[in-house]
Amino acid sequence: MSIAKEIAPHLPYLRRFARALSGTQASGDAYVVATLEALVEDPGSFPRDVAPKLGLYRIFLQLWSSVGLNDKAMPQDAERSAVERNLDALTPRPRQAFLLRTVEGFPIEEVGEIMMISTAEAAGLVQSAGQEIAEQVATDVLIIEDEPIIALDIETMVEELGHRVTGVARTHREAIALVGKKRPGLVLADIQLADGSSGLDAVNEILGSIDVPVIFITAYPERLLTGDRPEPAFLITKPFQPEAVKAAISQALFFDRRAGRKAA
């Protein structure tokens, strides 16, 4: 089987990882493109000592560390300044390990294989990143979810992280009404809602009036990972792991605050 066929199923998830790591879709996609170009130029560089998905992420992180890619990854001046502030504020290796483990869902052993370090070292990096993220300032969170049990689980996780839930909306109309009462600093949204309305439409309407980070939690990630713009930087697939949701919340707030936005 060709390298292209081996890695094709994993590219949408690598793009998600790249966006979360860089803080912008444009920057993340530029690094993914550079990874593919490198593999075309030198197919022999693709690791064969690990599974194809792990090899793809390993090549990506090796290129991520290359200073020569920075200008290519940030084509616009305004975007460049925001991303540079993000990267300057991060501790790179712990952040990579944290995203691989909690957002991408790799077992800690595989995190070590991707980063070419021991399992113990990988675990230490994840722990360091978690401590860094835990220092984030608490904010108000709007939950858009029509399943009561799922909404309660998400609300519990949000509060365990020290944030405040402004309300739980089951429909598009309820979501807009809650935003009108109190502006959130973060939105967690499902796509399909109770009355047949769309959580995506609700989010788009919200973003038309305020600038706020959004995390989509859905059973249909393929509806958002299409390659069209805009794509969500933070996407959790149902059924979800609590650690993945907590990690996405911390990451969304981290990048939002470091980019200079103002949460409520």
Image (cartoon, rainbow, N blue to C red):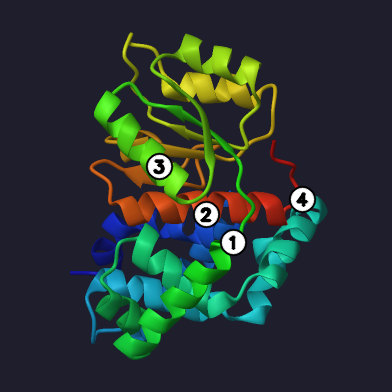
Label 4 neighbour load within 10 Å: few <14, some 14-19, many 20+: few
Residue 111 image offset from top left, x and y in percent: 33, 76
Q: Are the two marked residues, 2 and 4, in contact with CB atoms closer than 8 angstroms?
A: no
- Kind of residue at disc 4: Gly
Q: In front here: 216 or 157?
A: 157
Which element carries disc 2, helix, strand or loop? helix
Q: Single out the mark in the foreground, 3 or 4.
A: 4
Find the distance from the CA under tag 2 to the CA under tag 3.
21 Å
In the image, residue 179 above or below residue 190: above
Which element carries disc 3, helix, strand or loop? loop
Which of marks 3 and 2 precedes in the sequence? Answer: 3
Which of marks 4 and 3 precedes in the sequence? Answer: 3
Q: In front here: 181 or 173?
A: 181
Q: Which mark is residue 260?
A: 4
Label 2 neighbour load within 10 Å: few <14, some 14-19, many 20+: many
Q: Single out the mark in the foreground, 3 or 1.
A: 1
Residue positioned 75% across, 63% down in the render? 85
Q: Number of callouts in the render?
A: 4
Find the distance from the CA under tag 4 to the CA under tag 1.
15 Å
In the image, residue 124 above or below residue 255: below
Q: Is residue 58 left or right of residue 78?
A: left
Q: Which mark is residue 22?
A: 1
> Which residue is labeled 3 in the image?
225
Residue positioned 32% across, 51% down in the render? 242
- Kind of residue at disc 2: Ser
Which of marks 1 and 4 precedes in the sequence? Answer: 1
Find the distance from the CA under tag 3 to the CA under tag 4.
26 Å
Q: Is residue 244 left or right of residue 257?
A: left
Q: Single out the mark in the foreground, 2 or 3.
A: 2
Residue 181 image offset from top left, x and y in percent: 63, 16
Residue 235 image offset from top left, x and y in percent: 41, 44
> Which residue is labeled 2 in the image?
250
